[in-house]
Amino acid sequence: MPDIKTIAFDADDTLWHNERQFQMTQHHFKLLLADHAEPDHLAERIVEAERRNIRHFGYGVKSFTLSLIETAIEVTGGKVPAATIQQIVDAGRDMLAQPVELFAGVHETLEALTGRYHLAVITKGDLFDQERKVAQSGLGDLFDTVEIVSEKTAGTYQRIFGALEGGVDAAMMVGNSLKSDVLPALEAGAWGIYVPHELTWELEHAAEPEGAARYRRIEALSGLMKIL
């Protein structure tokens, strides 16, 4: 491995829990609409709505909440009660107020890397919510750079890493999403480190790269020290 200068981390479901909140809210939504559609059908309709809405509303809780409201309107033929819509809005508001819970070993791993590497967070989602989570995580002071982007592409990583010492060649992206964290980072010329999480949003699914010299898989963030 060449001389690494920059190590960047995804935030949600890499540094702290996130997807389980979406899963719990979706479960509650299915109970609310149980008289109008089967749970599996509702799950499919939610994903369809999210896929449509990403390009308009981006990622995060607000976009998810709008997708739930749209799905409720569709499956009820426009007859969803106002009280149900209010419950969906309240659920989204509750998600935005949830405390940040770090994964085990995250703080210790980042502290061990501080001062040795340029540490960055590269995350996508709602600006206010992501800023809140970085601040409440207690990790903010450990990072030299925090980037909240609308999408993660090879161009995104080339722009961010290209402005730092060593450029893309000396950069590493660590995350739980092959689609957003690993594959575009590899395409940009950086290292891509995959840390799988048991709960992965359907729209983030992708196959692991084969034969990629700069790809590594670790089962927990603490395994990063061994690679380095």
Image (spheres, helix red, strand yellow):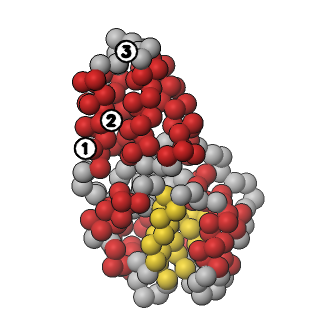
Residue plotted at (41% across, 77% down): 143
Q: Position of residue 154 (x, y in %)?
A: 67, 63
Q: Position of residue 23 (x, y in %)?
A: 37, 37
The tag on residue 46 is none
> Regarding mark 3 in the picture, which secondary structure is present there?
loop
Residue plotted at (52% across, 75% down): 7
> Regarding mark 2 in the picture, which secondary structure is present there?
helix
> Regarding mark 1 in the picture, which secondary structure is present there?
helix
Q: Position of residue 211 (x, y in %)?
A: 75, 59
Identify which amino acid the numbered label 1 is placed on: Asp
**Number of callouts:** 3
- The residue that disc 3 covers is 79
Q: For the residues carrying marks 1 and 2, which lies nearer the camera in this image?
A: 1
Quarter of the figure that contains the C terminus: bottom right
Please rate how many residues cluster around mark 3, counting C-alpha atoms within 10 Å: few if below 14, some from 14 to 19, many from 20. Answer: few
- The residue that disc 2 covers is 25
Please rate how many residues cluster around mark 2, counting C-alpha atoms within 10 Å: few if below 14, some from 14 to 19, many from 20. Answer: many
| Viewer-side residue, 36 vs 140 | 36
Q: Spatial distance from mark 3 to mark 2, Cα to Cα? A: 21 Å
Identify which amino acid the numbered label 3 is placed on: Lys
- The residue that disc 1 covers is 94
Using the rendered image of the protein, determine whether residue 194 is visible from the camera's viewpoint. Answer: no
Please rate how many residues cluster around mark 1, counting C-alpha atoms within 10 Å: few if below 14, some from 14 to 19, many from 20. Answer: few
Q: Position of residue 66 (x, y in %)?
A: 41, 37
Q: Spatial distance from mark 1 to mark 2, Cα to Cα? A: 9 Å
Decide: marks 1, 2 in contact (CB < 8 A)?
yes
From the viewer's perspective, is residue 98 above or below residue 211?
above
Q: For the residues carrying marks 1 and 3, which lies nearer the camera in this image?
A: 3
Q: Which numbered disc, 1 or 3, marks the residue that appears first in the sequence?
A: 3
